[in-house]
Amino acid sequence: MTSEPSQQPVIDFQKLRLDGVYRMNDADELMLRIKVPAGVLSVEQALKAAELAERYAGARLHLTTRGSIELHRVRHSDLAAIGRGLAAVGLTSRGACGGAVRGIACSTSFSPNFALTQSLARRLHRHFAGNPHFEGLPKKFKIAVEDGYRGARHLIQDVGLVLVAVTEGEARYDVWVGGGLGREPQAALKLEEQVAEAHLLPLVEAVVRTYARHTPAGKRLKHLLRLVGEETFCRLLQDELATRPRTLAPGGLDAAPAPPAATPPVTAGIFAGDLDAALLRKLAGLARSYAGSYLAITADQNLAFAPLNTEDRAALLEKLVAAGLRGDTPQEQTTLRVCVGNHACRMGLSPTREVAQGMLKAMPDQARTLSWAISGCPNSCSQAQLADFGVVTSRLVKEEDGERRPRFDLYQRQGTQLGEKIREGLTQAELMEAVSRTA
């Protein structure tokens, strides 16, 4: 008697997106994105991420520009175990992909207002993360809290909150809405100025609800603003606010890091945001010994520490050198944001890490003081339009030998708005020549 062949389970990759999972390739390898509240990891969370990477993702991790961590080449059969491991240290991947409020990005500049912005970002994270009322949105919805206008990341958020004043212990924020990159870059517009923190969560929630009610499937908030105009959008928003309270009850204790000491922070440069689990373990150990038991993922895909005093800072720098992070290589010294490209993304059109290495070799020394970014597709996950010079892989072109090769567009940012395209359709060789002429 012959037994029936076992049936492989049918995987609904679309449904997996809300759990922070994307299909990487036709071999059904997966990318799982971990939400890191406000981009700050405790030592225990960092060690757990390293452990999960070792078990299920080839011992590699990727740091994103929004302060998240990605595990690549994960198998569907391992997702439940990874989820349990994350939950054990207070992390989740829920809502890190798909039509949901994504992880709340937060400035990690360790400014004097670091604790204020961290506290707000964590309150927003608690409210939106895994909340079914804010899932099943038309598309992704990104929120960021910044402690100032440096870096201009508020321009590319669905909601950007920029700390502009602290008066009598009350933080006030400018509120920006409707920004985004991708194939149709659009800078956010200022919705309100100097909004008291107590009003922010109801306001942000009303923006999300307005977006959900009035935006076609597959479109971002920027599309709604283009469709109805600023005046109509503000009216729709006021209609939403009229049904809900305009103030927020005072919060309780927030599990945010203590304000950094006067000691300058220390940054470990992680080229392209890619590191192995063993290195993350070492860095977590250094954070435990010399930096208050936490470390932060920066918007430039590095890891930053806030040493408690000058002695700890000196010891931390010495230990980083021993770990191979001397800080004197072009990879560590140059601000160069890099998405995973076709190494680990189904949308990727170019091998971004190799292109980035070529750019580092091509650029003159004076250009290393500038900020750079390269995106492997037009989605611009590396925030190319916010760099002094940004590169976007725009398409593949079939050449005479029959091979399809990438073409690149070069952007330059001057002033306070998004960068503008200055060259397009470059071959890789032409891109390197253009980089060699920048300064």
Image (cartoon, rainbow, N blue to C red):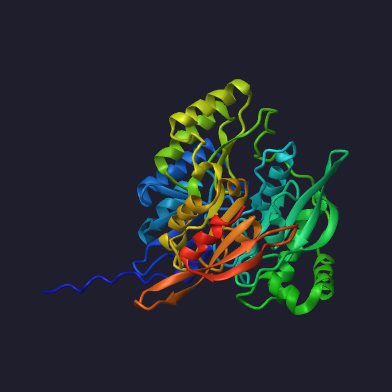
Left or right of 99 on screen, residue 117: right
Left or right of 348 on screen, residue 140: right
Residue reaching furthest to the right: 168
Along the viewing direction, whichever of 147 and 102 lies nearer the viewer: 147
Which quadrant of the figure has residue 7?
bottom left
Relative to residue 315, is residue 174 depicted above or below? Answer: below
Along the viewing direction, whichever of 429 and 345 lies nearer the viewer: 429
Along the viewing direction, whichever of 94 and 343 lies nearer the viewer: 343
Along the viewing direction, whichever of 178 and 323 lies nearer the viewer: 323
- Count of labels in the image: 0
Residue 157 appears in view: no
Residue reaching furthest to the left: 1
Relative to residue 428, is residue 302 depicted above or below? Answer: above
Point out residue 14 in the picture as x, y percentages from the top left corner: 48, 71
Quarter of the picture containing the N terminus is bottom left
Please tell me which residue is depicted at 46% across the width and 64% down the height of the picture. Answer: 429
Point out residue 411 in the picture as x, y percentages from the top left corner: 62, 63
Point out residue 106 in the picture as x, y percentages from the top left corner: 66, 48
Left or right of 254 on screen, residue 282: left
Point out residue 327 in the picture as x, y percentages from the top left corner: 52, 36
Please tell me which residue is depicted at 78% across the width and 54% down the height of the picture. Answer: 200
Please tell me which residue is depicted at 53% across the width and 27% down the height of the picture. Answer: 316
Please tell me which residue is depicted at 79% across the width and 45% down the height of the picture. Answer: 250
Residue 321 appears in view: yes
